Image: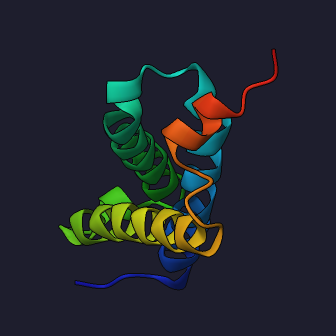
Amino acid sequence: MDITQAETIAVAIVGLVAPVFVQVVKPILPDNMTALFSLAVSIVLGMLAIAAVGGFNHGYAWGVLLVAVVGVSQTVYTAVNQVMGGKLGKTFVDENKLA
């Protein structure tokens, strides 16, 4: 299994961008769909990044890369949410909407 530097960088970038995208869209999502949407965004963006750098061309490394995207994005979201004191949660967003 050979993972290139371009694949690693693409995975890291997508892992950081996916949580931001989910936060932007979160206010319009139904309450019970946030986790599923977050996972779907991570997988779709990860597959696009892997395809963009040719990661599907050499064996099964793309599966490892996809797991890395999901892991990085979920870790980033959790860490930032802890630092912000839970302000990224759906409940906090709904309670503080502007009328």
> Does residue 38 sit above or below 25 in this rendering?
below
Please tell me which residue lies in front, 45 or 40. 40
Residue at (43, 72) in percent of width and height = 75
Quarter of the image with the N terminus is bottom left
Total labels drawn: 0
Residue 8 in picture, x, y percent from top left: 49, 78
Q: Position of residue 38 (x, y in %)?
A: 42, 43
Q: Nearer the viewer, residue 54 or 34?
A: 34
On the image, which quarter does residue 33 sit in? top left
Q: Residue at x 59, y 51 (%)?
A: 88
* Image quarter hosting the C terminus: top right
The percent position of residue 57, horizontal first and vertical second, equals: 32, 60
Residue 3 drawn at (x, y percent): 37, 82
The residue lying furthest to the left in this view is: 60
Residue located 51% across and 38% down the image: 90
Closest to the observer: 16 or 30? 30
**Picture quadrant of residue 24:** top right
